[in-house]
Amino acid sequence: MWVGLDAVDWAALKHNYGSAEDVPGLLRRCAGPDPDDAEEAACDLLNLLFHQGGWLCSAASAALPFLLRLAATPEVTCRRTVMELVARLASEAEQVIERFLDPAWRPAWERALPEVLVLLGDPEPWIRRDAADVVGVCGSSGELTLPSLLQRWQAEDDPATQLDVILALGQAVLRQPAGLHAAEVFDLLQGLLNAPEAQVRLAAVHALAPSKPDLPEQRLELLLQAVRDPSVELWRHTTAMDSGVQGVQHRTAALFPGPSTGFALGLLNNHPAEEQRTGALAQAAGLLAQWRSPASALLPRVAARLNDPAGEARFRAAELLACLGPASAAHADEVAALIGDNAARTTRKQETVSEAALWALARMNDPRCLPGVIELVAGARSGFASNSASYPATAGWHHAVLPSLPEVLRGLADHVERLLPAVCDQLGTTTDQQVINRFCQVLAGWGPAAKAAVPQLLSLMEDDQNWDGAALAIAAIGPAGNGARELLLARADAGGTHTELAAWAHWKVSGEPGPLLEALELAAAQGSIPRPALRKLADLGPYAARFADRIRAMTTDTDPWSRVEAAHALWATTGDTETAVPALMTAIQGLAKGNYLPVMLPAVRHLAQIGPAARPAAQLLHALPHHDPRLRSSGAWRGFTQDEDIRTAVDELLAACE
């Protein structure tokens, strides 16, 4: 097994953690008599040679033949982990750009391919599945791989392995040159669409879909029947998919080139298995996170799951209605019936169905959420997130999570009068600085409506640790916080890192621009005007016109946020639209193509403020209201609110430019 191992100059090779001189010892340990030690060594190799992917290291090329010898030896107990490593390396080699691919990899793979093909006939079904997966993901042509895969298909009697072989045939037949057996493979796969076994039919659709993108829609009933059949559990034993019900649902939905509303509706039909029902909601959420058009068709089916026997299904249904917010308001009564449903998830936070219902009602601006929210403000046990969190926007996938309590409160500005006493009580009793800052941010979001909190905020302003959060809230409340002007002026005159904040808050409550202009002059004297200062200059309007030349220079800044804030400040201080509008439009060019970045929202809002002079921007975005994919950069609930916010801003821009 180890012929040639010591002839390799391992110290001269690299893996993800540096020199590869430790690789030979790990390879030998993989063949050792202790199964636990062998598995540990194999996992170490997986980490060293692959880690998180992104490149093919020189040590991987050198280790490949020895990995395959380990995989071919029945006595090696970690064969499956070794095969997993081989599959990941073979797949990554086809995805990385050439400069991240070790030059020795392709020759090493060509020499290794015959050994991989031999493993298709291994006595152990798991190894045959692993080998089929490797052949499916590798870059070798169909001409080289199809004969062995066809031979395996003809001899295979293990149901799970058959599914892996079908998927491998579908992948290999597309790699050119496909060879003489390509037509035979396509005929075989086409015939399997009518096979007696539901999962074989499903595998055939998966194998053919890349070359026949219309096939999933044409065979929708076939797909639904297979995915909802108890035999779908067979996929857990495969290597290529290796997933339960939800994974098969997700992978199958991904076959559809557009929004698969029919597939989601079929999944949402009642089913005796809880995993099927919760999986259907997860799939509907993933679809709605990516597309807007399915909402009207899916909403009634999602709302029907509010009465599901399973707590997880009820939670997911309520959480998804919360994400859809105002669009789901017709189902508010059904959601309100779940207040008091304390069924908890099995997650770390153990969020309850009741909390998901409160969040949904809050998003609908329904006052029935207020008693429960007030209890949470007062310190009741909460499954809401402790801090604001972001999740990636992944196609077809949705993270069913709750926001933080301050994020819930900020959306309830219409109900400040009822919520404010509980918030003020917390500000008066807690000593937790983070909690104080979060509630001050909530008050800032509520603005002038929170004026009854001014006495509490004045008390906080006496505290050196908490005054800045209180100042932020006072500034947002505005003239009603005029009682803080002397405290703020004293802070501004004292100098230090928070001078600018104190001077700005003083301006907001008193209307006197002098202290803020002095503070901003100091900030601008350091060179480029900091972004927060640009916002304050815009707030001052014509009072800050003397900064115009420096602001104008920043409208071409390479940082899009600075560019947007500078353009807005220039317009706000001078009325210059000839410079401001083109600068703002540079930030929204991608939006017209359906690409969303957070900086686009303030840019569109600023353009809407400018009005008719921003008509070129309105013309650029005129078709956006009809764009079906959601405009988002984040996943979870935030992706839905991002889509709502940017579309509202675009509507305001279009109206302002009519």
Image (cartoon, rainbow, N blue to C red):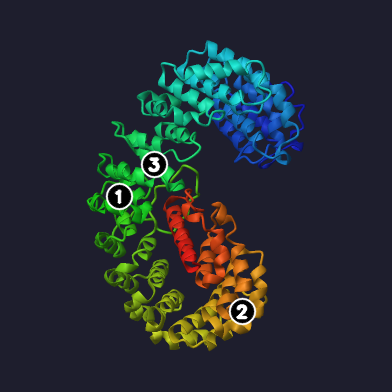
Q: Of discs 1 and 3, which sits in the foreground?
A: 3
Give SS at disc 3. Answer: helix
Mark 1 and mark 2 residues within 8 Å of each other at the beta carbon? no
Question: Which of disc 2 and disc 1 is earlier in sequence?
Answer: 1
Residue 316 relative to residue 161: left or right: left
Q: How many labels does the image show?
A: 3
Where residue 339 appears, x then y in whole percent? 24, 53
Please, is residue 276 above or below residue 185 in the view?
Answer: below
Q: Mark 2 points at which residue?
A: 523
Please, is residue 426 above or below residue 283 in the view?
Answer: below
Q: Nearer the viewer, residue 141 or 427?
A: 141
Q: Which of 189 and 593 is in front in this view?
A: 593
In the rendered view of the protein, which quadrant contains the N terminus?
top right
Residue 248 is at least partly visible in this image: yes
Q: Which residue is drawn at 76% across and 29% down?
A: 8
Q: Residue at x 42, y 66 (%)?
A: 434
The amino acid marked with disc number 3 is Ala
Please, is residue 4 above or below residue 496 in the view?
Answer: above
Q: Which mark is residue 352?
A: 1
Where residue 420 appears, x then y in whole percent? 30, 71
Q: Nearer the viewer, residue 275 or 572?
A: 572
Give SS at disc 1. Answer: loop
Q: Of discs 2 and 3, which sits in the foreground?
A: 3
The amino acid marked with disc number 2 is Ala
Question: Which of disc 3 and disc 1 is earlier in sequence?
Answer: 3
Q: Which mark is residue 284?
A: 3
Q: Residues within 10 Å of mark 2 (few under 14, many from 20)?
A: some
Q: How far apart are marks 1 and 2 (CA)?
A: 48 Å
Where residue 574 appears, x then y in whole percent? 59, 80
Residue 160 relative to residue 179: left or right: left
Q: Which residue is drawn at 43% across and 43% down?
A: 287
